[in-house]
Amino acid sequence: MTSRHDSYADAICDALGRLEALGLRWFLTGSEALGLYASPRQTVDTDVVVELPIERFEETFTPFQDAFVIARPIRAERRWLASLVSLDGWGKIDIILRDGDAWGRDALDRRRSFDHPIYGRIWLSSPEDLLLAKLEWSGGRSELQLRDCVSLVRDNPALDVVYLDRQAVALGVAGLLDRVRQDAS
């Protein structure tokens, strides 16, 4: 087997570059996005949201098999989750397939272009959508996720509160958002 990835960054850049070359809309989220907006936290994977109907997963990701082991999508509440693992052992990329719901479309429209010091030009979740995703995913059951949310609110005073409030109500996390705001003040 020929080595394709010499580092974790190589594996991430390869996957992100392939998504971009396919013309897919995507953005980095999770702990790596958190570290660019608030208090960083290390995890063992990279989370990427991709706009892709589940029916197109196989045709889109099968060509990735030359460099990644592909864990096929599973349904987890409101989303489909899949993973790419570098064949060279350099890490795991969790792929979150966005459904075509209103919040999913808004989050993709609000993503930000960012010059990452290691990955180069990437797409990044907005801080508001990162906050909403953490609240929606954890449902308030994870103190770690709630701490991340408090950090996001505390470190980003210019958050779009109108957008946050509207989406929090639609996602059923308005009470959690209020709790996070209170803890951040």
Image: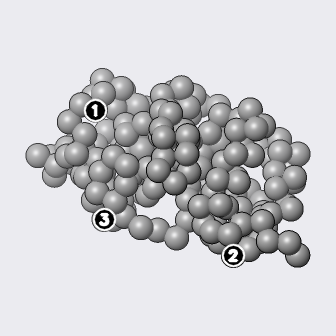
The label nearer to you, 2 versus 1, is 2
Outermost residue, left side: 185
Which residue shows up at 83% across the image and 41% down it?
Answer: 56
Q: Amino acid at mark 2?
A: Gly
Which residue shows up at 70% across the image and 45% down it?
Answer: 17
- Cβ–Cβ under 8 Å for marks 2 and 3: no
In this rendering, the answer to whether 85 lies above or below 30 is: below
How much space separates mark 2 and mark 1, taking CA atoms?
38 Å
Specify whether residue 151 is in view: yes
Q: Which quadrant of the figure has residue 53?
A: top right
Query: Which numbered dot is residue 129?
Result: none
Residue 109 in picture, x, y percent from top left: 54, 26
How much space separates mark 2 and mark 3, taking CA atoms?
30 Å
Label 3 SS: helix
Specify whether residue 132 is in view: no
- Cβ–Cβ under 8 Å for marks 1 and 3: no
- Cβ–Cβ under 8 Å for marks 2 and 1: no
Q: Residues within 10 Å of mark 1 (few under 14, many from 20)?
A: some
Which residue shows up at 66% across the image and 48% down it?
Answer: 16
Q: Describe residue 119's horizontal placement relative to residue 125 as left or right.
A: right
Query: Which numbered dot is residue 159?
Result: 1
Query: Which numbered dot is residue 89?
Result: 2
Label 2 SS: loop
The label nearer to you, 1 versus 3, is 1
Q: Describe residue 148's horizontal placement relative to residue 7 as left or right.
A: left
Q: Residues within 10 Å of mark 2 (few under 14, many from 20)?
A: some
Label 1 SS: loop
Q: Amino acid at mark 3?
A: Glu
Looking at the rendered image, the quarter that the N terminus falls into is bottom right
Give the residue number, with chain letter if any, for mark 3: 143
Which of pointers 2 and 1 lies earlier in the amino acid sequence? 2
Q: Describe residue 13's horizontal placement relative to residue 184 as left or right.
A: right
